Amino acid sequence: GSLAGNSKAVVAGAEDGNVIVWDISNNRSGSNGGNGGVQIIPHPGCVWSVTPFVDPNNNNNNDNHYSSNAHTDFLTTCHDGHIRHFTRNNSLIAPPSVLASFQQSVEAHRTQQHKGPTAEEIAKLPQWEMNALTQGRSEGQVQLFRKGDKAIAAQWSMDSRTWIEVGEVTGTNSGGSGGRGAPGTTQSGTINGKFYQHVLPIEIDLPSGGLQTLQIGYNTGENPFVVAQNFIDEHMLNQGYLGQIADYIRQRVGETGVVLGGDVGGAGATGAATNNSFGNGVMPMETTPIYNHLPMKGYKLFDSGIDKKGLGKVLQKIREFNDSDVISNATDSRQRQLKPNESIDLLNSLSNTLATTNRYHSSTVSNAELNTLSKMITAWGASHSFPALDLARMTVLHPDAAREDRRGYWEEVLNGALDTCLGLGSEGMGKEVAVPMLTMRLLANSYKGGIGSAEAAWGLMDRILECTEGCVPSGNKNVRLSVATVLLNTSSYMHASSTRSSSSAAVRILDIVGNIVGCGAYESEAIVRSLVALGTVLLLPGESGMEAKRVTNERSIGSMLERVASMHGDMAKAVSSEISSILS
């Protein structure tokens, strides 16, 4: 962030081990020469934070020289365990021996990066011979394995449910001199507001015969396969280009760039590249249309109330119900009522974990805490279980709570929630608010929480769509938005897991969206989410997408969407226009 006071500098730390200082004063260059006022300070590891520093003992400002630089100092924290103080005040500069030691540690770190993964790092990777034990989550996912004494990258194929070897993971090129297009002749720059040490051009051959030039950013030390995969996802490119792009990054081709679909000089996607090794000729490439709003990527969440105040209200209502006559005096109260350690100790512990969102990467949720939650959802009934549904809605977003080996648990919880909601009947789902709304929100969040909860929702697809359809006529706008969000997130998960998508589920989503847009009761945001869900289903590959398009055209849903979208703002009209393009 910006340094304190009147300083004309902005400083940022990055995971690639660099601290970048932008001098934003007029007509000034950084200390690295004419690089647009940018100074790059390498560190021996990932830079976790950058903090402005003002000497608390310098209030009198007697030293004019120091006073002019009082607000340009900053501190950095680095992955190597050191906090470092950077200054422009000559009287505070460290001794030469300390500076030399710092430089040596930086060079040692960069040398290690160029060498690739260490033997110790390779030893921690899963064995290639045992790759069947590691299941991929989506088409084209990249995973590193240990094959002998080498690290290799592999891609997950949803069709064959197997890993396909891409190539060996080696170190990055250290750069150097060279002529036009030679390895190492890259330029730094900014893409979408993010600074990269290497910005490389990639040209895409368009069906019209022209070329579209894109840029890919790469920082020293990053995994080329991960960078390539992110680039493919961002621009919706053919997954088959992963190895070619990763190899191109490793070779660091300069001005010439790479043309996707071009000849690789007979060396193969992972072969040794030379100057212009990706070919001058451009072969035709199947280009997938790129839309601004479709398909849906990622998920919309209901994450309000995940703080001490919000959680406190939920726990208060749970304890109120737990002590009520309906629960405590029931004939099966032993199975239904929470014990003191459950209602106090375990719920307090779960609440504290959920409220500390900045520790989600390291905090855990115990089985005992989760079992307390499922007990309420499956045994308390519609009139008392809704605060437990709300707590489950928040709990499922914790990565440890929703991890892969807890799929069975979330199947039980989601089934319990669906039983409660469907048990209201068609009239109850249309009139009630708490259970339908919180059930829908729990289902929507399940796709985002983790592999366990997402796969549980996937396995209950038919019941989820049945319950969602039952809640469509709701007279409450919060329920209506929740219904649309379940459809949106379901379609997004279907698209991410496209080879497992069923035509029947796709058509059912079309039917539900048709009911939503046809009833005339839904607000603009819910309409937009419903339209994006429909458009995402239409873009499913293979038989599912083809059947969805056929049914949509057969029922003239497209023309109805245009009429409805015209009443719900520019976003609805833009999505509707893209749907029309897909159907044409």
Image: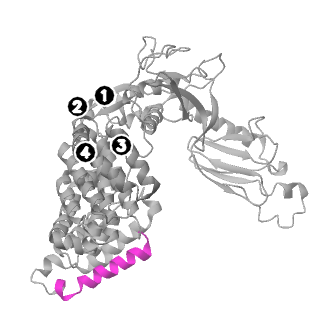
Q: Are marks 2 and 1 in contact (CB under 8 Å)?
A: yes
Q: Is residue 72 magenta?
A: no
> Which residue bears the numbered disc 3?
580
* Colouring style: one colour
Q: State which quarter of the image contains the C terminus.
A: top left
Q: Nearer the viewer, mark 2 or mark 4?
A: 4
Q: Along the line of sight, which residue is nearer the eye, 444 or 31? A: 444
- Asked whether, in this view, residue 497 is left or right of residue 199, the answer is left
* Of callouts 3 and 1, the N-terminal one: 1
Q: Name the residue that disc number 2 marks.
A: 160
Q: Label 1 sits on what residue type?
A: Ile
Which amino acid, by three-letter code, is at mark 3? Ser
For marks 3 and 1, give the one nearer the viewer. Answer: 3
How far is mark 2 from mark 4, CA to CA? 30 Å
Instruction: Give me the C-alpha separation between circle 2 and circle 1.
Output: 10 Å
Q: Nearer the viewer, mark 3 or mark 2?
A: 3
Residue range of the region highlighted in magenta in the rendering: 306-327
User: Taken as a whole, is the magenta stretch helix, strand or loop?
Assistant: helix
Label 4: state its secondary structure.
helix
Q: Which residue is mark 1?
A: 164
**Does 321 lie within the magenta span?**
yes
When the figure is inspected, residue 534 is found, relative to residue 202, above or below; the finding is: below
- Work out whether mark 3 precedes mark 2 in sequence or the reverse, and give the earlier one: 2
Precedes in sequence: disc 4 or disc 3: 4
